[in-house]
Amino acid sequence: MKSLFTSESVTEGHPDKICDLIADTILDAHLETDPDSRVACEVLCKGAAVILAGEINSRAQVDVELLTRSVIASVGYATDNSIFSSKNVRIENLLSTQSERISGGMTTHDGRLGAGDQGLVFGYAKNETRELMPVPILLAHRITKAMALHRKTGKTALLEPDGKSQVTVLQENGRTLEVVRVVASAHHTKTADLEEVRHYLSQIILPEALGEWHNPDAQLILNPAGVFDIGGPEADCGVTGRKIVVDTYGGAARHGGGAFSGKDATKVDRSAAYFARFVARQIVLRGIAREAEIQVSYAIGVPDPISLSVDTRGSGDILLAQNFAKRFDFRPAAIIERLGLSAPIFTSTTNYGHFGKTGLEWEK
């Protein structure tokens, strides 16, 4: 049976992703000095305002305002005449320390590290790409990443930091056959001609980004709203954690609901999701199944998972896959040690998906 499936991505200049990157940069800055830092940082950006909120327990001394401005500049919002820019934003710092009753509850009576919160996570892998990722989200990320790369390397002077992509594929029995539709909206300079922007997307960005999946017959819907010369937090409000499907599998797998960015690895929303992806990859890499989705759940302060289940979606021996997954240690401390999650590596995960990238321990 044939069907259509769509996934989306956003650039690093999208308002929500600016917030995610600020939060992860603050997290990494604390971990650099104090690997035992406990960080739960939330960010909101709108107009010329940036609000930092949440709880941090750390021995590190971090200038969060300076870091926030450096992140905004690195993304591309650095001009003097912009409402939202590294020079013009006003920053309200509402970060405080974590309640002792919460932080103290993370360690059990025998000294073991409990889960930083209750919750459930999913990990997923599929063997239709080298990265073991679904085709639509992989391609959507390639498009937005190419838009940012062309802008930042000076290949074009047309583009500004904000932007989105959306890729629709034709599938048959879960296998991707071809790309049939692409939506892309590129934030552009005020002097750019709209048709020139559309031409650059269709003739330069998309063929390069889609590579072997480029389909000359696919329908292209480029900047469908027309002129897009006002973007970022000047045009829209950004908040951490609003791109959880973009961050994971583009809707091809379920999501537990917890966001990643701004959270240290004691928060299983993040660390256990990374480890569930790692175990799902091992199932697929070993040929136990062509596709694997793992669910893990936790209770706050309790080290051992409350539940662990595996779904191969009919692509392999589910009992064998479940028994294989049970060999792994899903306790938070074990995950942190195995994946090296006390290190300041989180800004490398923020944009263009937390999965399917080389160099990350859960992708090995």
Image (cartoon, grey):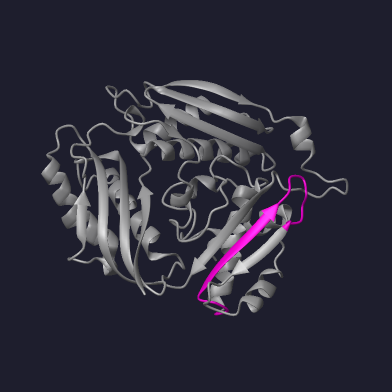
- Answer whether residue 72 is visible to the viewer in this image: yes
Is 319 or 230 nearer to us in this picture?
Answer: 319
**Residue under the image location 37 percent in, 50 percent down:** 9
Q: Decide if residue 83 is on the left or right side of residue 332.
A: left
- Quadrant (top left, top right, bottom left, bottom right) of the C terminus: bottom right
Is 70 or 325 nearer to us in this picture?
Answer: 325
Q: Decide if residue 302 is on the left or right side of residue 180.
A: right
Q: Decide if residue 88 is on the left or right side of residue 248.
A: left
Q: Residue 204 in magenta?
A: no
Q: Is residue 309 above or below residue 342?
A: below
The x, y position of residue 132, in whole percent, is 46, 68
State which quadrant residue 207 falls in. bottom left
- Answer whether residue 60 is visible to the viewer in this image: no
Q: Is residue 231 above or below residue 132?
A: above
**Residue under the image location 35 percent in, 26 percent down:** 84
The x, y position of residue 57, in whole percent, is 69, 32
Which segment did they paint magenta? Answer: 287-306
What secondary structure do most residues of the magenta stretch adopt? loop
Task: Count numbered badges in the picture.
Answer: 0
Q: Residue furthest right?
A: 110
The x, y position of residue 80, in whole percent, is 29, 22
Q: Is residue 163 above or below residue 41?
A: below
**Residue under the image location 27 percent in, 22 percent down:** 81
The x, y position of residue 194, in whole percent, is 14, 41
Q: Decide if residue 170 is on the left or right side of residue 360.
A: left
**Residue under the image location 39 percent in, 58 percent down:** 137
- Quadrant (top left, top right, bottom left, bottom right) of the N terminus: bottom left
Q: Is residue 49 above or below residue 250?
A: above
